[in-house]
Amino acid sequence: MSSPLPPLPAPGSYPIIVVGMSAMGLRLIERLQAAQVPCLALATADEAANRGPEFDLLHVPVLRGAPPWAIELAQLPLAEYGAFVAAGDDQSDNVDTLLAARRLAPTLPLLVRLDDAQLRAFVAHSVPGAEPFSSAVAATPVALELVERLMAAQGERMRVIRRPLAAVRGMLPRPGALFWSVFAGFLMGLLPTAAYFARELGLTYLDAFYFVWVTALSVGYGDIHLRDASPAAKLIGMAVMLFGAGFTAAMAGLLADWLLTRRLGGLILRVAVAMRGHVVIFGAGTVGTAVATELQRRRVAVVVVEREQSSHGVAQLRAIGVPVVVGDAEAEESLRLASVRSACVVLALTQRDATNLHLALRLGALRSPVPCVVRLQSEEISRHVEASGDFPSISTLSVTVAAAAKRVEALRDARRHALPAPATEVGG
């Protein structure tokens, strides 16, 4: 049930209606009221019960009801409000509330919190006067600025991909110990055999090596043959053929293994990337995906580590050519697969503050520390980390609230100047 209606707005005050009493909604009200912008909170019964002490501290009027808030909004003089903000955690509820507000108030400025990029584009296109906002959009420029600042402090610049081939260098095969062992064994078998045939057939060593090479690889041009050679030479030639067949099979197996690893790595394996001087991002959520996408657009070498293979960000990033390592951010193997120790900057952008802090501390303790930017949900922890000066941090809540509040104030000011001044009583 709805609570009693709040008092009518003071003439010319144009309060802001805020729906969705998540941490973001409350911080937005707090910031607006600190800027002398009056607010009205629309809260469900559960929100009103759980957030009651905070509402009291903020001295904000509260109208109780339920999404999509059409009944409650219909009872308000919406023409006297400055803007409407849907800041809840549930995107569906935010869109439902947005549409109800637009239907009831065609000219009221609307801001809606939407983390999904496609949904933001749809709302911006289909709902006149609606402006989506999100943590990803707000945090991306801040993260990029911190990356550039860290690189400038090291006297370096972010490694920019300048050639088409370099864009996929991290995906090219990097021969491992097994490859070199097989190849070295092949050469060690050919060298003494070439010396034998040089003496037996009266050839130069280069011609003899050429002969055993084409014999081992079953090419056999026929320009040098063993038809008139001694029985021992023929037996050794046959052994070289068998030896070469084994080498060819081993190399074909290694090649097939690499191809399957690249093709199925996203499904059943975790694939290492070979890069240096790149940016590593931990977390393919909305913020991590947005930052990685922008770095890729700027042609900066970037690798993303994500724990969940089923994450929407993994498919989105791989579709634009960003290498993604599937693994736990706190596992040593994930750091190795992403070549973290050779990276220029690491961004810990997972949704868990503890994971991000642990990663930053771990990288800072290396013999050659890797600069790290940390995403923190908690404003208190973020302020503490910034004050300590150990590593830069991003409070996604703070930057998103700051960006939303700034836009709300601008829309409210524009509405105040656009609408006619409210009538005032002239008494005698």
Image (cartoon, helix red, strand yellow):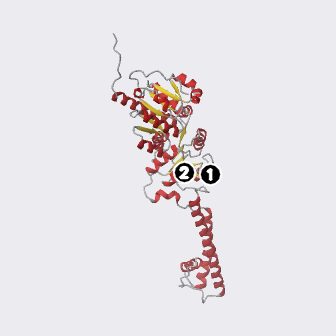
Q: Where residue 36 appears, x then y in whole percent?
A: 44, 24
Identify the residue under disc 1.
Answer: 333
Of all residues shown, which one is farthest toward the bottom?
228
Q: Residues within 10 Å of mark 1 (few under 14, many from 20)?
A: some
Give the mark toward the camera: 1 or 2: 2
Q: Residue at x 46, y 33 (%)?
A: 85
In this picture, residue 167 sits left or right of residue 187: left
Looking at the picture, which amino acid does disc 2 mark?
A: Val
Q: Is residue 122 visible?
A: yes
Does residue 308 lie above or below 414 as drawn? below
**In terms of depth relative to the viewer, which is nearer, 372 or 86?**
86
Identify the residue under disc 2.
Answer: 314
Does residue 367 lie above or below 240 as drawn? above
Q: Where residue 393 appears, x then y in whole percent?
A: 52, 37
Looking at the picture, which amino acid does disc 1 mark?
A: Glu
**In terms of depth relative to the viewer, which is nearer, 151 or 93?**
93
The CA span between labels 1 and 2 is 18 Å
Q: Residues within 10 Å of mark 2 (few under 14, many from 20)?
A: many
Q: Quadrant of residue 415?
A: top left
How many numbered marks does the figure carry?
A: 2
Q: Are marks 1 and 2 in contact (CB under 8 Å)?
A: no
Of all residues shown, which one is farthest toward the top?
428
Q: Quadrant of residue 38?
A: top left
Q: Residue at x 49, y 58 (%)?
A: 168
Q: Residue at x 45, y 39 (%)?
A: 132
**In terms of depth relative to the viewer, which is nearer, 312 or 332?**
312
Q: Where residue 274 appears, x then y in whole percent?
A: 54, 56
What is the secondary structure assignment of the residue under circle 2?
helix
